[in-house]
Every structure is written in structure tokens, then in C-alpha cells.
């Protein structure tokens, strides 16, 4: 496994990050523990979760993914100082008006709840899950800075921010001498490119912000199990995939991944990961896996090295056009 610096920081994270959104949703707790242990065996030292996972499942109060990680850690899953643990704040965690968002009030409550569920006394990377336009940026950044100074959080990052908001956040941190966002977690894959590549990519490169894309397999689409004229696979993700990628562009992308992968004896999933990691802005791809077999398949993508010509040929198929 390759370890890369998270942006301009000195922190080294594995090129594959284990996403844990499926815990409590499409995987039960024993499977979650097995996936985490195998991920560590494969050299992964970086896990991503969020307080809100998987609150969308009926009867699930949220926090389940963090709880599964906390139980696994407490059971000796890995020595705490060997794991880079990332979680997020902002999602709705209760019925009260302050049980969500990025106010100082909610952040201070949410971090304590995450620490309790994760059974740890610090979070390596604390991320704002998405923008909160009802809270001033300086309020959020000052609260996060206090957590860094208290030692409860080591680095801060953001997710789903547009470029203008990330640039403004970095500027506020700079002029007020507050901890700055050292990572961005964008939605980015071979079939979902423009949102990141248009403005965020040059910004992150210029500012030394680490990039840790989520859904690099297109929520399972870029694995070969979604095919033209083939019944949908049995997956909690299938509905979303069908709406987004089951079209001519998506199928052409799959065919190109399959063709390029053949020269490396790589599966579609492995080639999709290799494509993502070949982008010099990307630090680590956050993958999901509902079984050990999926995990083992996808992780090998970090070993596949695409040539410049192969990368270019792949890029051409899902290129996006500047809208003017
Ligand atoms: N910041 C945010 O807003 C945000 C949003 C989404 C995700 N995330 C983070 O990113 C992580 C990954 O997101 P994601 O789950 O969408 O990523 P993904 O890697 O694109 O998709 C993972 C899903 O694809 C299927 N799959 C994975 N490997 C496979 C293989 N080798 N063969 C066949 N199917 C395979 C599995 O679903 P099935 O088995 O059910 O088909 C798996 O859960 C999440 O866990 C979370 O940590 C963050």
C-alpha cells in the first residue's frame, strides 16, 4: 500500500481510505468488523465515517457507523495511534433546532457524541459534511480551531464545498490565524468529474489541500455488475445508480475501463480506482465495500499504474465541456 501526504500536512494516509457509510445500512456489525480488520491487513490506515451514518435507514437514529468503529477499536481492532480516523459533522442528529448544522453550539455537542461513540479521545480529521449557509464561516472555523487547540481534533477538512466557499474559508483561517481546512472530500469518479475538476481541482492544487474523493466507484456502477440489458443487482445502491449512470455515457465509460484494464489484468473496479489515483491532486480514494471479496477486489486498484497514454484515452471518454 502506498502512503501519501494529506495535502500540505505531514500526515501520511493510505492511498485507499475505507468508507463506512454502509455500516448499519447494507452491512451488519460482524461484517463491518471483518471488513475493517481485513482493510488493516491490506495496509489501509485511513477510515472515513460521519455522525449521521446511517440515519436514513428506518429506525436508525444515526451514529451507527461510528458505534461499529468504536466497538471494533475497543475490541482491539487496531492500536489507536495506527489509525487515521476521519468523521464529519453537520447532518441532522435530533429533532431540536440545534441538532444539526455548523454552529459552535452544534459542533461542540456533536464532537462529544462522536468521541463517545468512537470510544476514543481524539479525532484525526474532523470534517464539515456540507456547507451550512445559516452559520457564519468564522463561527464554524473558530469552533473547529478550539477543538484543535484542545487536542480533541488533529486536522480539519470539509466536504461538498464549492470552490468559492473553500477559498473563502481558507482566507478566513489565514487572516484570523485559525486552523485551516487541510482536506476536501468531493464527489469524484470516472463518471462524475466536472463538479471537482472545473474549479476545485486547481484550487486544491494551488492551496495544498488534500483531496479524498468519495464514491470513486460510482456507488458500485464502476464494477461491472451494472450492465446494459441486464437485471439490476441486488444492492441498496441500485436505485441511485440507475438514475445517475445507466445511460450511453455510463456504458461507454464501463467499456473503456474494461478495455484499458485488460492490459493490466485489472477488473473494472481496479481500473476505476487506478484512474482516480492517477490524478496528482488526489490523496486517497474513499471506497465502500459490503464484503471482504469486494474490498479485496477494489484495493488492488491502488497497485495498477496507468501510462500517460492510457490515462488520456480514458479521460477522453468522460470528458466534460466548459459551459460558457
Ligand atoms: N461526504 C459525503 O457527502 C459522502 C457521500 C457519500 C459517501 N461518502 C463516503 O465515501 C465512502 C464511499 O462511498 P460509496 O460507498 O458511494 O463508494 P463507492 O466505492 O463508489 O461504492 C461502494 C459500493 O459499491 C459496491 N461495491 C464496492 N466494491 C465492489 C466490487 N469490487 N464489486 C462489486 N460491487 C462493489 C458496494 O455496494 P453494494 O454491494 O451494495 O452494491 C459498495 O458499498 C462512504 O462510505 C463514505 O465514507 C461521503
Image (tube, rainbow, N blue to C red):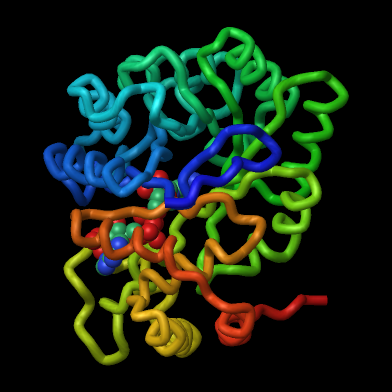
Q: Could you tell me residue 161's position as x and y percent?
A: 65, 46
Residue at position x 40%, y 80% from top? Answer: 264
- Ligand 1 lies in quarter: bottom left
Report if residue 232 is visible in the image.
yes
Nearer-the-camera pick, 118 or 293: 293
The quarter of the displayed image where residue 234 is located: bottom left
Is 149 placed above or below 58 here?
Answer: above
Left or right of 93? Residue 209 is: right
Is 127 placed above or below 1 here?
Answer: above
Report if residue 61 is visible in the image.
no
The quarter of the displayed image where residue 242 is located: bottom left
Left or right of 321? Residue 176 is: right
Judged from this view, the residue extending furthest toward the right is 175
The quarter of the displayed image where residue 244 is located: bottom left
Left or right of 95? Residue 178 is: right
Judged from this view, the residue extending furthest toward the top is 150
Left or right of 136? Residue 50 is: left
Q: Quadrant of the C terminus?
A: bottom right
Q: Could you tell me residue 100's position as x and y percent?
A: 49, 27
Q: Could you tell me residue 102's position as x and y percent?
A: 58, 27
Q: Could you tell me residue 87's position as x and y percent?
A: 45, 32
Residue at position x 66%, y 42% from top? Answer: 7
How many circles with numbers are drawn on the protein? 0
Residue at position x 26%, y 59% from top? Answer: 296
Nearer-the-camera pick, 31 or 46: 46
Residue at position x 38%, y 69% from top? Answer: 270
Amino acid at each position: 500500500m502506498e502512503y501519501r501526504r494529506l495535502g500540505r500536512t505531514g500526515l501520511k494516509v493510505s492511498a485507499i481510505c475505507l468508507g463506512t457509510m454502509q455500516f448499519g445500512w447494507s452491512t451488519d456489525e460482524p461484517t463491518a468488523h471483518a471488513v475493517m480488520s481485513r482493510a488493516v491487513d491490506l495496509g489501509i490506515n485511513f477510515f472515513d465515517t460521519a455522525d449521521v451514518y446511517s440515519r436514513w435507514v428506518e429506525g436508525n437514529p444515526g451514529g451507527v457507523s461510528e458505534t461499529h468503529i468504536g466497538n471494533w477499536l475497543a475490541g482491539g481492532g487496531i492500536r489507536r495511534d495506527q489509525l487515521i480516523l476521519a468523521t464529519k459533522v453537520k447532518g441532522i442528529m435530533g429533532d431540536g433546532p440545534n441538532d444539526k448544522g455548523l454552529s459552535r453550539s452544534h459542533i461542540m455537542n456533536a464532537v462529544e457524541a462522536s468521541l463517545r461513540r468512537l470510544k476514543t479521545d481524539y479525532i484525526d480529521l474532523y470534517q464539515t459534511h456540507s456547507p451550512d449557509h445559516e452559520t457564519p464561516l468564522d463561527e464554524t472555523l473558530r469552533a473547529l480551531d478550539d477543538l484543535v487547540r484542545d487536542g480533541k481534533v488533529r486536522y480539519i477538512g470539509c466536504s461538498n464545498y464549492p470552490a468559492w466557499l473553500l477559498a473563502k474559508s481558507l482566507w478566513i483561517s489565514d487572516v484570523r490565524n485559525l486552523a485551516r481546512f487541510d482536506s476536501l472530500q468531493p464527489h469524484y469518479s470516472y463518471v462524475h468529474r466536472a463538479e471537482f475538476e472545473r474549479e476545485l481541482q486547481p484550487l486544491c492544487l494551488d492551496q495544498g489541500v488534500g483531496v479524498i474523493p468519495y464514491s470513486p466507484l460510482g456507488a458500485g456502477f464502476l464494477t461491472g455488475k451494472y450492465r446494459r440489458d441486464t437485471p439490476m443487482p441486488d444492492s441498496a445502491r441500485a436505485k441511485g445508480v440507475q438514475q445517475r449512470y445507466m445511460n450511453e455515457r455510463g456504458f461507454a465509460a464501463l467499456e473503456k475501463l474494461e478495455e484499458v484494464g485488460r492490459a493490466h489484468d485489472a477488473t473494472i473496479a481496479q481500473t476505476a480506482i487506478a484512474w482516480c489515483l492517477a490524478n496528482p491532486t488526489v490523496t486517497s480514494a474513499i471506497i465502500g465495500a459490503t464484503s471482504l471479496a469486494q474490498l479485496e477486489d477494489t484495493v488492488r486498484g491502488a497497485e495498477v499504474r496507468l501510462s500517460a497514454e492510457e490515462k488520456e484515452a480514458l479521460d477522453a471518454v468522460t470528458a466534460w465541456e466548459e459551459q460558457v
